[in-house]
């Protein structure tokens, strides 16, 4: 089956075998844009690391296009298919020169040199960093470093990209740029799994999975999730301001129509009152 499949997955670590994830069942299909939403300590990062075998399940099974992540003979093929972008780009950048850093992944896959150069050029163009190809990675801003980290993954031509809180350390402009790049990547058919706690990032996905204390508590469309203020508050997540305000006004008798998720939707419905 094509896709990333987690079947009854549990993950424990340490001498005390602390449970981080328990009985996770999840399928992510080709071409989807899925956000994994959860508060700190919910198990989001561990879940992302299971998807390409960075960590292995204690119980259950994780497969990528039918390949089991515990099968050592398949792990290189899995890593080719599933790229991983970390929260801190400094943990992912390995070279002092931009183009050398982006070329690192394809070189380790044994790609011919001419093709590597083409891939590097294409990847840097896609993230808007081609003019920086000969620059030092040490001189880049946080947002630029994250774009280089994404380019390094793109140069490996993955089918899936897992992004673990990729904008958490960026300023608003950096966040906006990275998210636009991520959306463009998804539009050309690459599956995106975005780990986040930012509600505005959830809005742009096809499907959202809410994780709390190591369990999947709900899966649905962004609208179904973000307008469920009770669910979000119960799991230490803050609902969008528009949704919270709409819920408060409804409690006080306001006849606000629709399921309000954004500021624009709130203003539109409020004007009808």
Image: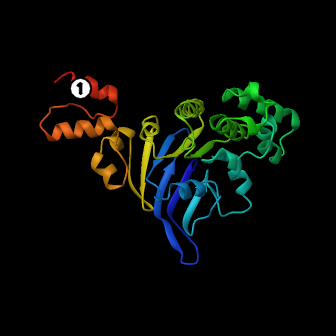
Label total for image: 1
The residue sitting at the bottom extreme is 16
Which of the colour schemes (rainbow, by chain, secondary structure, one colour) is used? rainbow
Does 108 sit above or below residue 50?
above
**Residue 48 pos. (x, y %):** 56, 53
Residue 61: x and y, percent? 56, 63
For the point 60% across and 56% down, which residue is it? 49
Coordinates of residue 10 in the picture (x, y in percent): 51, 66
Packing grade of label 1 (10 A; few <14, some 14-19, many >=20) is some
Q: Is residue 29 visible?
A: no
Q: Which residue is found at the position 64% from the left and 41% from the top?
A: 159
Determine whether 41 is above or below 173 in the image.
below
Mark 1: secondary structure: helix
Above or below, 174 against 238 in this view is above
In this view, which residue lies farthest toward the right?
113
Horizontal side, residue 52 vs residue 46: left or right = right
Q: Nearer the viewer, residue 247 or 211?
A: 247
In the picture provided, is 248 more to the left or to the right than 191?
left
> Is residue 149 at all visible to an observer of this figure?
yes
Compared with residue 85, is residue 134 higher up or lower down, i.e. above or below? above
Residue 200 percent across, percent down from the top left:
43, 36
Q: In which quadrant is the C terminus drawn?
A: top left
273 with respect to 81 (left or right): left
User: Label 1, on which residue?
Assistant: 269
């Amino acid at each position: 089956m094509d896709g990333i499949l987690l079947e009854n997955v549990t993950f424990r670590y340490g001498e005390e075998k602390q449970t981080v994830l328990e009985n996770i069942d999840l399928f992510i299909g080709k071409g989807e844009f899925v956000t994994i939403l959860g508060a700190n300590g919910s198990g989001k990062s561990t879940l992302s690391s299971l998807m390409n075998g960075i960590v292995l399940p204690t119980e259950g099974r994780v497969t990528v296009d039918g390949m089991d992540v515990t099968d050592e003979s398949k792990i290189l093929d899995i890593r080719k298919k599933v790229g991983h972008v970390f929260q801190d780009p400094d943990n992912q950048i390995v070279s002092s020169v931009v183009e050398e850093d982006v070329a690192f992944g394809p070189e380790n896959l044994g790609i011919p040199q001419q093709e590597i150069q083409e891939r590097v050029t294409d990847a840097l163009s896609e993230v808007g960093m081609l003019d920086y190809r000969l620059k030092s990675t040490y001189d880049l801003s946080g947002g630029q470093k994250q774009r280089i980290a994404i380019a390094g993954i793109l140069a490996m031509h993955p089918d899936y990209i897992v992004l673990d809180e990729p904008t958490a350390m960026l300023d608003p402009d950096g966040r906006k740029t990275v998210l636009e790049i991520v959306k463009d990547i998804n539009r050309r058919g690459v599956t995106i799994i975005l780990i986040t706690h930012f509600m505005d990032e959830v809005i742009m996905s096809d499907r959202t999975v809410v994780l709390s204390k190591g369990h999947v508590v709900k899966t649905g469309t962004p609208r179904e999730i973000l307008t469920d203020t009770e669910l979000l508050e119960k799991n230490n997540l803050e609902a969008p301001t528009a949704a919270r305000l709409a819920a408060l006004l409804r409690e006080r008798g306001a006849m606000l129509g629709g399921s309000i998720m954004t500021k624009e939707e709130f203003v539109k419905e409020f004007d009808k009152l």
